């Protein structure tokens, strides 16, 4: 069974879908770190997606293969995770360890942002999701920790 860790490893950013105050969806992107169970993003309070998450702590994290990586645009590998979101305070015991791993993945630019007080760390915990790798190759995200691909047997896979 495939794990999300190996599938998400090549990606540097995720496309975020959040719900705006006017109830319309809002899309943006952010660098991320995935620890095998949770997707972490470190974003500014000034950003619309941060304001949306603070008002409604749910988001989608979408990962899609670059168009130049495949001959057929319909065969692009893609993973969509529907997540509950929780802010992680700088005083939280886990903050420093998560940020150290995040900087290790993303580089020193992220390290510079850590000094900016308006940036906050958020944990996006997958509740359900799906992955598609081409025609007829679709999976639900499942398993005990919502980090494995499960072959589809019908239905959309969401609750």
Image (spheres, grey):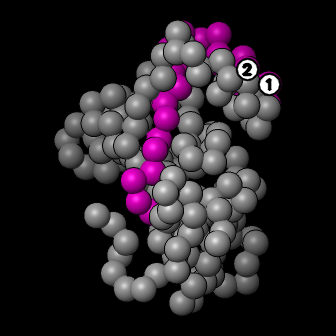
Dot 1 alpha-carbon crowd within 10 angstroms: few under 14, some 14 to 19, many 20 or more: few
Q: Which residue is mark 1?
A: 108
Give the answer, above or below, for where 117 lies relative to 44. above
Q: Is residue 105 above or below residue 89?
A: below
Which part of the image, by quadrant, shows the C terminus? Answer: bottom left
List x then y, in percent, for residue 137. 57, 85
| Residue at image point 59% right, 20% down | 95
Q: Is residue 114 visible?
A: yes
Residue plotted at (28% across, 36% down): 56
User: Camera-side residue: 28 or 11?
Assistant: 11
Which residues fall within the magenta stretch? 107-129
The residue lying furthest to the front in this view is: 144
Q: Are marks 1 and 2 in contact (CB under 8 Å)?
A: yes
For disc 2, the marked residue is 111
Examine the image and state in which quarter residue 20 appears: top left
133 on left or right of 128: right
């Amino acid at each position: 069974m495939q794990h999300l860790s190996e599938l998400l490893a090549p990606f540097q950013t995720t496309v975020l879908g959040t719900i705006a105050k006017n109830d319309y969806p809002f899309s943006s992107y952010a660098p991320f770190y995935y620890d095998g169970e949770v997707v972490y993003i470190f974003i500014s309070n000034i950003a619309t997606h941060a304001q949306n998450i603070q008002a409604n702590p749910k988001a989608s994290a979408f990962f899609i293969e670059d168009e130049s990586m495949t001959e057929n645009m319909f065969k692009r590998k893609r993973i969509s995770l529907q997540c509950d979101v929780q802010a992680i305070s700088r005083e939280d015991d886990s903050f420093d360890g998560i940020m150290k791993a995040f900087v290790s993945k993303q580089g020193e630019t992220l390290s510079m942002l850590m000094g900016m007080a308006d940036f906050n760390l958020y944990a996006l915990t997958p509740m359900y999701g799906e992955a598609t790798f081409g025609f007829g190759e679709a999976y639900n995200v499942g398993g005990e920790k919502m980090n494995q691909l499960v072959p589809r047997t019908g239905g959309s896979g969401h609750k």
